Structures are given as C-alpha cells and as structure tokens.
Amino acid sequence: MWYLAYNILLALASPVILLILLSKKRCRRGLLERLGLSGFSGLSRLSGSQPDKPDEPVLWIHAVSLGEVVAVTPLVYALRRRYPHDRIIVSTVTETGREAVEQRLAGVAEHCYAPLDFPWTVSQFVERLAPRAFLFVETELWPNLLRALHRRNIPAVMVNGRLSSDSFRGYRRIKSFMGQLLNAVTLCLMQSDRDAERIIALGARPSRVKKTGNIKFDQPLPDPDGVTGGLSRSVLGLRDDEELIVAGSTHPVEEDQLLSCYEALQKEFPSLVLLLAPRHIERARQVEASARAKGLAVQRRSEMEQGRTDAAITGQPRVIVLDTRGELAQVYCHAALTFVGGTLVPVGGHNLLEPALWGKPVFFGPHTDHCVEIAALLTGVGGGMQVSGGQELAAGMAAQLRDRAAMRRMGEAAKSVVLDNRGALQRSLDLIAGVLDHASPGRSAALQQYGLFPQWLLHALAVPYGVVVRARAALYRLGWPATSRRLPCRVVSVGNLTVGGTGKTPVVIALVEQLLARGRRVGVLSRGYRRQSRETEMLVSDGRAVLVGPAEAGDEPYLIAMRCPRAVVAVGADRYRLGRWVLERHPIDCFVLDDGFQHLGLHRDADLLLVDVSDPAGLQALVPAGRLREPLSAASRATALLLTRADVGNWRDVVDTIEAATGRAAQPILSQFRAETLIDVATGEVRKAETLAGRTVVAVSGIGNPASFATLLQRIGLRVGDQIVFADHHDYTATDLESVRERARHSGADMIVTTEKDAGKIAPLLKSGEQVWAVRLSFDILSGRERFERTIFGEAEPALAWTAAHA
C-alpha cells in the first residue's frame, strides 16, 4: 500500500517535477533519457540495441552531482583496480555531474543519466543494464529503483551515507515505509555514529549498518605544482603582494554578509582580494550585481585569459566571481583564508575538507548539520572557526591576518584533521568487496533461469505458486486429506528452502558418517533427481558395494554411496514407500532423508534446514521470480537451523531475515566447507589441497552455487584462470569435455578442477592418462555442535532451533 500511495503521488506530481527539472539548466540535458523516452547516449547496453558486451559484469554507481562524483572518485579507481574486468558505469542527475565523470574518470568509468523514479523507467533501465551491484552515494533512497533492484536480487549498497536532521525528521513521519524501503538495501555504510543510529531508527537492520567514516577524507593529496601550472595566480590576476580570501559554495544572503566582511577587512588589509564561488554558477550574474552595488570592482573567471586581466582594476579592492565548474578545489591552493558556504544560512554546509586538504584555515557559520562531525573535528584541533555572522567572521579573519604564525598553525591543524581520519575508503572497499565477491556476475538467478521474461510476469506467477504451497502445508498440518506417514525407525531430514546450492550433499555425508561411527545402521533415501533409471525404487548401494553409476542413480545419491560405503542408499520418488521397501531388505536404525524438507508425506523426527549465508538473495522471492521453494515463514517447521558457508557472509543478516519471516528468534548452527583434498578423477590419487597452491586452473562445475566453488578454490591458493559453469546436475558429453580442454589451453591453465559431485559423470569421458582433479569438501561446525548432535541422534526437543521472539 505504501508503494501504491507513493506511485499515485508521484504520478500526480509528475507535471510539477518536469517543470522544475526543465527550469534548471543543469538538469535539462539527458531528461529524455531519464524518462526512458530515448536511448542512453554512449551506452549501447542501454540503447535498446544488442549490448556490445552482454557478458561483461557491470557495476553501477550513482552519484547525484559534482560533489558526490568528487567524493566517490577514489572509490571508483579502487574498484577498477580490484575488478579490472568489470564495466563501471557512473550515473548522475546533473550536467555538472556528467562533466565531472567525463573529466575525472575518463577511461575508468562510463557516464549515463540516472532514470527518474517512475516504475516503468527504472524497470527498463535495470533490465537493460543488468548490473551485478548498485552503489549509491550518500542517501539517494529512490523507492521504485531500490524495489526493482531488490526484485532482481541485485545488491544495493549505500556508500558514505548520512542523514541530516531535516531528512531524519521527515523520514520518521513515514517510518513504516522507510522500513520496507531500507529492507532493499544490502549494506548501509554510514559516515558517523549519529548517521548509523538514525538509519537504524528508520528501520534498517543493525547487521546491515556499518560505520565506515567519511570517504571525503581519502581524497588524493593535492599537488601544488600541478595546480600552479594550470590555475596560477597570474591567471586570477593576483599580484605578488595581494592575498586571496576564497569563499566557496556560497548562497544568497550569505554573499551579502561576505561582501560586508570583505569591506571591513579591506580597511586594515588593503591587499586582500575576495573570490566568491556561488554554489550554483548560474547565479554568477546575481553575485556580480551584489558586489557592484557595494561599489566593488568585479572580475569573472570565465572572462579571464592566461596573462590577460583588466589592468584598470588590478591592485584595487575587487571581487573575483568563480563562474566556471571544477575549479573551486584548485583555487583553494592560492587562499590565505577560506570560508565554506551553506553555513551562514540554514542549508547545512558543504565540503569543509577541500580547503583543509590544502592546509588552509577554514571558517564556517553555525549551520553545519550536513558536516557536523567534520566541523567538530576542525574546531577541536584549532583548524577551523565557527562564526555566528559576518561581523564575527571579519573579526576572526582579522585576528589571523595580524598573527601569521597563528594562521600557519591553524592551516596545519586543518590539514592534520584530513590526514588523521583517512581510512574510510579502504573500510568501505572491503565491505563492498564482501558483497561483490558473492554477487552473481550478471543477471539475477531468476532471469538466468527464465530468460528475458519481464519481472512483473515472474512475480505475478509466483503469487498462485505461493498460494498452492501454503495450502498444501496447511492441509498436511490439519491431517486432510492425508497425514504424514511414519516409518518404524528414526527419520532425520536434511533439506532447504531454495532451489539448489546450499551444500546439502556434504552435510548428508557428514551426518551419515557420524551415525555410522555411533554404530547405527543407516539408510539414505533420495529422490535421485535427474536419474535416467525408471525403476520406482532402486538400490544405489547395499552397504557393501555401489551397485549403479551416477547416470542411473543421480549424481548426488551416487556421491553419497561412494563416500559412505557402509550405508544403504536408495532412490525413489515416494520416500515413505521407498523406506518400507528398503526395510524389507535391510535392517535400518535411522533413515536420512536427502532433500526432504518439502516431502511432507513422510513424518520426520528431526528436520535439519540448511540456509546458505553466502546467498542471501536466494531468500527474497518465490519461484519463478526467485529461488524460494516455499515462503520463508516455512522455516518455522525446522527442528534445527543450519547456516552453511557462515565464514564467507553476514550470517546475522540472514538470521534477521528468517526471524522477521517466522516471528521467532533462531538459534542457528554455524558451519563452513573446506577443501580438504584433491582427487585425481581417473586414478583416485589423493593430494592435500595446499600442495597445489599457486597453480592456474580451469574451474568446471554443474552445481547450484558455482560462485562458491570459485571462491573455495581461491581460498586454497589456486588461481582461477577461467570458470566454466554448467546447469545444476548437468549430464556431461564428450563435446563438453573437448570445450573444457580448449578453454584450458586458451587460458594457460595448469590443470582442470571440478567438484566431487561432477567427477562421477566426467570420469567416463576422460582420455587415457588425462588428469582432472575433484575437490573433496570437509564439513566443519563453527558453533552449535551440541545442538547438531542432539538433533541427529534423537536427543533434541521439538522446535529446538527456535525460541519465542521478543517484542
């Protein structure tokens, strides 16, 4: 309902929004693109034609205008170094932002205009761009855009986030909506403790909020020689004996106070020149008129040329109006004293760090809500001075001009604030990399599986599917038309809520091994997904020998039988009937139900539910829009919640998501997978994983989570030269293997590495003497071992994984 109300209001306000944008010169260019009414200039991927590099992973970074582009530039360069094969696209809203991207990020990133937040516009944009992640600077919370990304399982990260007091008060009035909106943000990287507390108060999950500091501290240190060669004192018409006061990012009313301050200082310091840099350069004529009204000579930067200034006014009291873009940060180099605007009027302040970076004394007014922490740091070390108005500003500047040693110390203190608070860039980069390294390098899982079906259709189809699975579960709870049937021995189920990729098979193997070690006679019941045999019930292993191959049994039951030779393994669609069939032939103490969470027709004594921490996107939507087999609330049926790959993701965030869906507080078991050994697929030779570190490999897999396989190889020191991904449970052919060999030669790989699950299907296709290595995983419990053992050995209480959620 919130989104419906928002879009109704947006539609009603759209004529006014368009008129405002047309009235602002800096926002006119690219307006048709932002409305989705024309192609996106310079980006064939967005033009509606065939993308020029459709398989190239895309990072989308949004920075509203010039200030945000300047702030994020070091991060863009860092991301380019870390992800050299990604295509980085930076979107802006204004013309000044576009110019900044093209000047500062030429050859590093491409520019496009950001879409307006109309549902059809953002949907079209995201569909065509298909980014693997979206990073947005500060607090650009656009509901339809974030919702479109969330529905496509594309992570969104707020970078250098901040919340002013006015914004916080406004957002609190719609806190319920903000909670929904912030649920679509994967990470909130906030500038300060105050910003972090405010975003949490609006509904962001605490586990998703990190205080990283302000990346503006990490701007490259300026090169005075380079600036002098480009924007010298002579270009500005300054004589050797003249000193410059630079007032940057100024606003109306504020400029009148600055002119009065300059007039007062001129009486004692006649060699002073004032440079006014209005926040919006289209106001340059207005600023010039204000200065002339006070009888001051005026020069405009745009009219100056190298070595040619108006000699008639050189040496006189005068005002230079900086009416060009991108030069303010440089001109601070020539300042004796500086003032940062938006602080004598209730705007909130602008970038106090630009003059501090040059080691210049920084003056500012009382309105610093947008930069309150930086203002406090500057005043705390004596590098900045907060003044109440023009008179106090004149007195403070005069005091510094009288005591040059004090002025020098003030400038040094200002620079120390910048140097002492660097590091936010690296902290932000590390957290962003944690998201990117586990994000799919292209389209979302739903789009990969269902091609180019529009998202609205996939979500529409998910609705009746959700109704059916909810009704089915409810009927089984009510015992109508049938109840779950019981086998005459203990049954432990291992399953998940998503389609593939959580690591069920290694967990089943570990569980069976523990039961066997305790002397239990164990049977494994599996569906035998994609097996070629047609028997209703079939033995894969009788506990003494493996009876059939992976094609007849299915790759997972075959692997379980190979790894657990003393267990009986059988496959069949009806697990109750299969269990009775096995019991007629073999004595069994405990059945392990492989992938059995949705098999409600068989009673389970324990339900072990697996959730992959490295794939939080899998928990967002039902199939076909996402990968959930059942609504997330179905997790409440589990006896124990086992989080896999808890070492490579934010497991607390996953727990928060599940608790919100179930209304219960979870007590998860945390686990990880390690590459224990590598096995020669043809000969069975076993090597310790670390003995092959440093080799270049081609990674071949047909599993549910191929990204996790590449990450696993990298963690044992192998360099993945190429990754070949087949569909889960893929049936390999000789043509497939020839393609793998060709890509291995092309990438210069030393060896081919696959998963143990895939190995059984690849082995018959190998040439004599050919080596392909399979990774054998070990399953380690990081915490909750006692709960795990109580669950599988029958000592657990019902609903062990859950306690009543606190209000």
Image: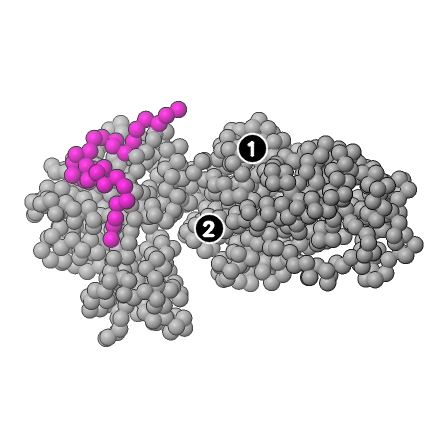
Task: Give the amino acid type for the residue marked by disc 1 in the picture.
Answer: Leu
Residue placed at 25% from the left, 35% from the top?
A: 639
Whether residue 344 is in magenta: the answer is: no
Q: Residues within 10 Å of mark 2 (few under 14, many from 20)?
A: few
Find the magenta span and give its range. Answer: 778-807
Return the x and y of residue 630 as percentages of the image width and height.
35, 39
The outermost residue toward the right is 312
In the rendered image, is residue 599 in sight?
Answer: no
Residue 4 bears which disc, if any?
A: 1
Q: Is 151 in front, or is 480?
A: 151
**607 relative position to 292: left or right:** left
| Label 1 element class | helix
Tag count: 2
In the drawing, does residue 725 fall left or right of residue 506?
Answer: right
Question: Of the residues shown, which amino acid type is indicated by label 2?
Answer: Asp
Give me the residue at 24% from left, 75% from top: 769
User: In the image as oriented, which residue stretches furthest toward the bottom?
Assistant: 768
